[in-house]
Each structure stands twice: as structure tokens, then as C-alpha cells.
Image (cartoon, rainbow, N blue to C red):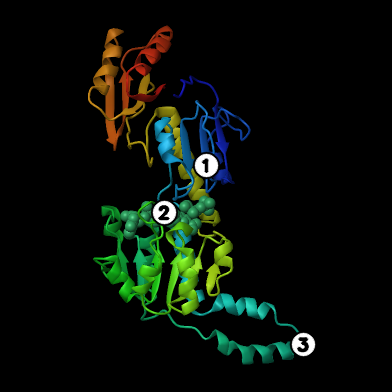
Amino acid sequence: MTTITLNKVKTIKTLNNIAERGLNVFDKEHYAIDNDDPNPDAIVARSYNMHHMDFNDNLKAIARAGAGVNNIPVDRCTEQGIAVFNTPGANANAVKELVLTSLIASSRNLFDGLSWVKNLDGEEERISKQVEAGKKQFVGKEVKGKTLGVIGLGAIGALVANDALDLDMNVVGFDPFISVDTAWNLSRKVHRAMTIEELFANADYITVHVPLTDDTAGMFNKETFALMKSDVHILNFSRDGLVNEGDMAEALKSGKVGKYITDFPNENVLNMPNAVPIPHLGASTKESEENCAVMAAKQVKDFLETGNIKNSINFPNASLPYTGKKRVAAFHQNVPNMVSQIISVLSNYNLNIADMVNRSFRDMAYTMIDIDDEVNGDILPVLEKEIREIEGIVSLRLI
Ligand SMILES: NC(=O)c1ccc[n+]([C@@H]2O[C@H](COP(=O)([O-])OP(=O)(O)OC[C@H]3O[C@@H](n4cnc5c(N)ncnc54)[C@H](O)[C@@H]3O)[C@@H](O)[C@H]2O)c1
Ligand SMILES: O=C(O)[C@H](O)COP(=O)(O)O
């Protein structure tokens, strides 16, 4: 359970390189960035693997400055009442640009050509002779008029799909859970595949933009390769676990898959001919790193200071204008009578309610209650103790 922190400097720990502009969101009067503090109030991270970490009792929030949260033990955070945030869309443009770059570059055999030319030596005249004689091995294909299949039409997939139309490609998209916002932003020229099999059957290039979950793990495997066109190019800027790499090696060897462009190099991929490993550069632009860091920091700061929640993946979104009145912020099980029990504690101390919000997300719920009256500091610890003792309360703050 978290403890109440009143007017003390809050500590933020970072686990990766976080852009300065983001860290500056935490003003020095109220926050310290301290990576050695064993008891931080919040963690800001990127891809750091947190599955092996124990979280301190005082930890209230973890912000992933980025999209994928498979590096965070989200269920354990929920059990401990720690809010986990990410930054939807903040790095989408950076990824889109690299996807389109790689799509064309690999189709034109640019990566192979570049490494070949770097190894040429000799006099200038000899080099140019070798170039003119050797370039035939890198004859590529134009993307114009070909079909791109986009799996996952979220922040990144939708941008890729729309821009690929401007390359005069036919675009087929598949996303059974597409959000209303994304659907509005998607060009009508993107053909909607009703099944993933339809997309596999028609695409010359496939790019995947879905999170790694139990449902999506290994979605590229020998059964699904069998449904694809020969010489299909597959681009994976999402996560390595989406691909069965043993099956991919076979598919590359047989020519079923012509190229495998992946942002997630590992020992297997480095040894696969026709794999193009990129060192996880999808989100690595100054703009994207700043967008993600600023968004993550603002969300954490707001949560710590007001209890308001935006873009959490395990707490419900909840917001109440913060007036400076004493606020009860409780994360609890989504079961009957929780709110009434909290209110009953307040009533016992004759405290009137100014405003409140209660939101639920799956099995959990979050309640914020603003107290109308000036609350005597002496009763705060008693209030805290009594509310914590309500069965089903997971974490509590009096802000
Ligand atoms: N390479 C990088 O640097 C980099 C950067 C950002 C994100 N990513 C990865 O890309 C993923 C997508 O990022 P995003 O910002 O577009 O996320 P997003 O949440 O905006 O979009 C994901 C989309 O996938 C869809 N989806 C989920 N399961 C699906 C399924 N089985 N079939 C088809 N669609 C499905 C969802 O409905 C959603 O629209 C992230 O989860 C992360 O793993 C990588
Ligand atoms: O999921 C993401 O946002 C990306 O994989 C980016 O990861 P990074 O922040 O470590 O570059």
C-alpha cells in the first residue's frame, strides 16, 4: 500500500535516458530526479525490463515514455496499486517515417548494396568499374502499384497506411479493435480486410503495428506464411515476439519471405540471410523522445499532484478539477459499496463532500472525493487509517 506524502519533495527515478525537456516538467522546488533513491514516488522509463524488479511501498506511478508496455509487470503493479501510464501516439510519426524508409530501402536492396559498396577497395577507376559490374545483384522492386498490408491500425499503423497511399500503393488494413478516433483519421482509400487471411493473401509487403500480448505472440509462423504470396516482405517495428523466428528463418531460406525487416535484432535474426536488423531505432528521434518524455512527465506530475489520471493502462481515466481542497484518491476493487463505505468514514467526522468521481476499469475502480470543509490536520492520519481498513482498498492518498 502507498503511504501519504504531504508537501514533501517527491522523487522521480528514471530507468532509461529520458529527454531533458521531459525531466524539466518536474520543477526543482517540488521534485528531485534521483536514480539512487530506493523509495521513489514515481518511475519514468522507456524499454527497461522491469519484470525482475521489486517495487517500493511508496511507489505510486510508472510512466512508459513510449507505446509498448510489455517491459512492465502490469498485473503486479495493479495488485500493488501502482498506476502505469504510457504515451499513446507520441512516437508514432518517428516510427512511421522509419517504416516507410525501410519499406522502400529494402525493396530497392539498399541495405545490401550499402554494405557491399563499403567493402570495395582500390583506385577510384577500379571502384567505379566494380560498381557498374556489381550493381546488377541489387536490382530491386518499386513499391508503386504494389499492395501493402497493415496489421493494427492504431497510432502508427494508421499513419503508415495513409502515407503509403501517397506512394501510389494499394493499402489493405486489418484491425478488429480499431478505435473510433483512428477510424475517422484513416483514408477511405484504405481497403478494410475482414479477416487477416484476406490481408495475407493479397499483400506484397506486410507491416505489423500491434502490441505484443498473449493473443498476438507468434502471429507470424509457418501456418500464416503459407497463406502469403511468395517473396513477401515483412516489416516488424512492433516486437520480436510477434514472429516465430525459427519459422521465419525457414521462410527466408525458401524464398517464401523475401525480406524480413525488424527493429528487434537478436542472435537468431543476425544470422538470417535476407533479414534486415535495425537497432531499435523506431522511436529514436529528438522529436519523438521529447514528445514521449514530456507527455509521460506531465501525466505523472498531474497524477501525483491532483490524483487525476490520463492514459493509464491499468487505472481508469478519471479527472476532477483540482481546487486545492483535501482530496481522497482511492484505488480499489470494482465491487459494490466501496464508495458508500468511504463516504461513511467521512460522514463520521462530519465532513461534507464538495465533488466526487468514480470510474471503473475491468476489476478495478478509482474514486476521488473532494472534501468541502477545512480538514483538521490531526484527523488526517485517522481518516487514512479508517479508509485503508475498508476491504478492497488497494492504494490510497489524501492529496
Ligand atoms: N520500434 C519502435 O521503436 C516502436 C515505437 C512505438 C511502438 N512500437 C510498438 O508498436 C506497437 C503499436 O504502437 P501504436 O502506437 O500504434 O499502438 P496503438 O495502441 O495506437 O495501436 C495498436 C493497434 O493494434 C490493434 N490490435 C491489437 N490487437 C490486434 C490484432 N490481433 N490484430 C490486429 N490489430 C490489433 C489495436 O486495435 C490498435 O488499434 C506498440 O505496442 C509497440 O510494441 C514500437
Ligand atoms: O514501444 C515503444 O514505444 C518503442 O519500442 C520505443 O522504445 P524506446 O523508447 O526504448 O525507443
Residue 372 is situated, as x and y percent measured from the top left of the image, at 30, 16
Residue 247: percent from the left, percent from the top?
A: 45, 68
77 to 352, vertically: above or below: below
3D distance between C-alphas at marks 1 and 3: 52 Å
Q: Helix, strand, or loop for circle 2?
A: loop
- Relative depth, front residue between 48 and 304: 48
Which mark lies nearer to you, 1 or 3? 1
Q: CA distance from mark 3 to mark 2?
A: 50 Å
Q: Is disc 3's CB within 8 Å of ligand 1?
A: no
Q: Which quarter of the rendered picture does the C terminus lie within?
A: top left
Q: Are discs 2 and 1 less than 8 Å apart at CB?
A: no
- For badge 2, the amino acid type reads Leu
Q: Nearer the viewer, mark 3 or mark 2?
A: 2
First in sequence, mark 2 or 1: give its number: 1
SS class, disc 1 = loop
In the picture of the structure, the residue carrying the numbered disc 3 is: 123
In percent of the image, x 73 and y 91: which residue is there? 125
Quadrant in which the N terminus appears: top left
Which residue lies under the disc numbered 1?
A: 50
User: In percent of the image, x 52 and y 40: which residue is there?
Assistant: 44
Sequence-first tag of 1 and 3:
1
**CA neighbours of label 2 inside 10 A, class few (<14), some (14 to 19), many (20+):** some
Q: Can residue 142 be seen at all in this image of the molecule?
A: yes
Which numbered tag is attached to residue 212? 2
Disc nearer the start of the sequence (3/2):
3
- Residue 63 x, y percent position in the rendering: 47, 40
For numbered disc 3, what is the local secondary structure?
Answer: loop
> What residue type is disc 3 on?
Glu
